[in-house]
C-alpha cells in the first residue's frame, strides 16, 4: 500500500472507531464492535494502532486537533456553532460522543487525565491566543481580563456539550450562542 492509501485507511479506522466509542463508550467498544463499525479485521485495525487505548487516544487527539484549529481560526464560539450543527445531524454524533467519553475518562482515569492535560492545554492556548488577537484589533471587550473571557467561553462550551449529551433540544440555541458571542465583544 502507498503512504496515501495507508493514511486513508487510518482515517477510515478513526471514523469508524469514533462512531463505535460514541455508541458504546470505551469499555463497550469491543474489538468485534470496532471490526463491525470499521468494516475491517482486527489485524487491519491494529496494524495502525497498538491497542484499543491507542486507538481511542488517536480519535480524541484528532478531535482535539480539529477543535484547536477551528478555535485558532474562528474562535471557540465557532466550535459551539459547529457542535450545534452536528447535533442536528445524528450521523455526526461521533464527535460529541468522543468528547463525552474523554470527559468521563478524565474523571475516572488519573493516568488518562495526566496524558490528556497537554492536549487540553492546546485548545486553551488557542482560545487565549485568539482572544488576544481579537482584543488587539479592537473587537473584544477590554473591561474583563482575557483569562476570565477564556474561562467564560470554556464554560459555555462545556454547558453546550452537557445540554446536547442530555438529549435536550438544540433547535433554538442559536440566539444563546449569539448572546455568548455578544458577551465577549465590544
Image (cartoon, grey):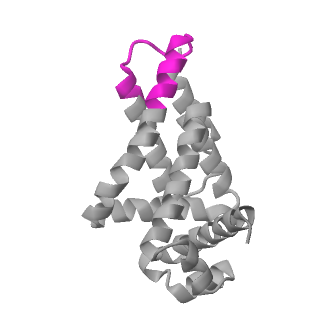
Residue closest to the far front: 2
**Highlighted range, magenta:** 127-149
Say if 164 sits above or below 180 in the image: below
**Residue 122 included in the magenta stretch of the image:** no
In the rendering, at what x and y percent does residue 34 appear? Answer: 57, 81
In the rendering, at what x and y percent does residue 15 appear? Answer: 64, 67
Say if 9 sits above or below 35 in the image: above
Residue 165 in sight in this render? no
Say left or right for 43 vs 126: right
Secondary structure mainly formed by the magenta segment: helix
173 vs 186, nearest the viewer: 186
Say if 185 sits above or below 173 in the image: above
Quadrant occupied by the N terminus: bottom right
Say left or right for 21 vs 118: right
Point 53% across, 37% down: residue? 76
23 vs 180, nearest the viewer: 23
Residue closest to the far bottom: 32
Amino acid at each position: 500500500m502507498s503512504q496515501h492509501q495507508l493514511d486513508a485507511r487510518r482515517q477510515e479506522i478513526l471514523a469508524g472507531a469514533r462512531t463505535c466509542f460514541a455508541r458504546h463508550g470505551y469499555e463497550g467498544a469491543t474489538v468485534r464492535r470496532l471490526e463491525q463499525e470499521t468494516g475491517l479485521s482486527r489485524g487491519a485495525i491494529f496494524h495502525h494502532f497498538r491497542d484499543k487505548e491507542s486507538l481511542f487516544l488517536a480519535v480524541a487527539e484528532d478531535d482535539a486537533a480539529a477543535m484547536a484549529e477551528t478555535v485558532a481560526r474562528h474562535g471557540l464560539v465557532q466550535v459551539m456553532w459547529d457542535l450545534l450543527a452536528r447535533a442536528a445531524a445524528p450521523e455526526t454524533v461521533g464527535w460529541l460522543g468522543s468528547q463525552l467519553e474523554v470527559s468521563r475518562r478524565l474523571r475516572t482515569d488519573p493516568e488518562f487525565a495526566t496524558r490528556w492535560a497537554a492536549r487540553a492545554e492546546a485548545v486553551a492556548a488557542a482560545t487565549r491566543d485568539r482572544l488576544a488577537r481579537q482584543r488587539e484589533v479592537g473587537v473584544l471587550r477590554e473591561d474583563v481580563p482575557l483569562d476570565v473571557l477564556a474561562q467564560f467561553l470554556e464554560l459555555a462550551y462545556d454547558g453546550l456539550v452537557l445540554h446536547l449529551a442530555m438529549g435536550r433540544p438544540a433547535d433554538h440555541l442559536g440566539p444563546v450562542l449569539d448572546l455568548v458571542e455578544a458577551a465577549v465583544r465590544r
